[in-house]
Amino acid sequence: MNKINFNKVIRIAVGSTLSFFVCHLFGIQNSASAAVITLLSIQDTKKETLSDVVKRFFSYLFSMITAYFLFTYIGFNEIAFCIFMLILVIAAYKLNWLNTLSSSTVVTTHFLLAKSFEPSFVLDEIFLVIVGTSSAIILNLLFWDNSHELLRKMEYIENDLKSFLVKMRHFLLGDEPLPDEERLVFIKNHVEEGVKNGLEYEKNIFEDTAYYGQYMLMRQDQLETLMRIYRSLERLRDDFPLKSDIAEIFGRLADNVDKRECYIYNKPLIMGVISKYKKQPLPESMKEMINMAALLDILNELLYFCDLKKTFVEHLTPKQLERYYKETLNAVDIPF
């Protein structure tokens, strides 16, 4: 069952009613058609709505001019209408106006039924299109957006990641067993939904919204990194070196995962543990070889986990940095 988009439902209901009311108030013929134009013009995002309105308006002007010549010289009959539809559909395919066909056809049939191109009637029809499309734009401009939902989803994801990092720290310290992989799958589903929502919201052109999609993609990459770390933790056998050091890294990451800053405080810690790893004696048994290989993979993945956030911040615009990472801009003296 499809999920109901109540935001769009209310916009369509309110916008269509407003268009009909305004046209009826001004005594415009065929006022109900303005409601249909609004219904067809309202899309999921402001960008899509504005693009659709522009196409719809030019499509209608083209339709009206074409209908005028055909109906005037051939007559207000079925033959002229058939030729009109052929021209309109071909133009729609060539100019990518397919989604405007319905409104252009509906409004143009008013001329066919009225058998008139009187200036007052033409102005009424233009008024219908202007009111119908304007209502769609106004409702999308003034109506609330779902940025608060994205922010809440971001907070949920951060808390999930923090909880899992803490559990892996406890595992390394011997306080509890390795957490269930199903928890990672659960977080993955949240992140994938967040990526979809963030990229959809990015289509909004009236404010800086690209941050949300970029953020969700970064979290998706980090989660995939955590899943690889999880596989490496499963490979570890019995006692292995650097347990407490790696546990400290997980603890530090958990402390920072919900903060709006780079992991600039974590990378030096990881590099320090990598230095300790390089000073470890060569493995003398198969078990030690497996442990050392797994540890190296874990340390490299942890380093990559941090670099993902660093790369994410580096690719943000100055406006995004000022809005979301002002504290990072003030920490330029801290090395990555």
Image: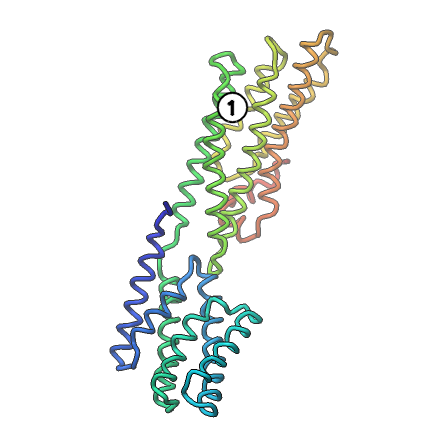
Give the residue drawn at x 72%, y 15%.
279
Q: Nearer the viewer, residue 148 or 293?
A: 293
Compared to residue 218, the image places residue 73 above or below, namely below
Q: How is the image coloured?
A: rainbow
Where is residue 85 drawn, in percent x and y? 48, 77
Residue at x 36%, y 88% (from the top left corner)? 115
Alpha-carbon neighbours of circle 1 within 10 Å: few (<14), some, or many (≥20)?
A: some
Q: Quadrant of the N terminus?
A: top left
Q: Nearer the viewer, residue 269 or 241?
A: 241
Q: Position of residue 247 (x, y in %)?
A: 55, 19
In this rendering, the count of numbered labels is: 1
Q: Amino acid at mark 1?
A: Gly
User: Closer to the camera, 22 or 245?
Assistant: 22
Q: Nearest the camera: 174 or 139?
A: 139
Instruction: Name the side, left or right, on which 5 lies relative to 165.
Output: left
Q: Quadrant of residue 295?
A: top right
Q: Is 6 placed above or below 303 here?
A: below
Residue denoted by label 1: 251
**Helix or strand or loop: what does disc 1 sit on?**
helix
Side (left or right) of 67 relative to 288: left
x, y percentage for residue 101? Answer: 46, 71
Tell me the quarter of the image containing the C terminus.
top right
Please tell me whether residue 244 is drawn above or below residue 76 in the rendered image: above
Q: Percent x, y for residue 303?
A: 63, 30
Say which residue appears at 57% left-offset and 15% top-offset.
244
Q: Residue, x 42% and y 82% (percent of image)?
A: 78
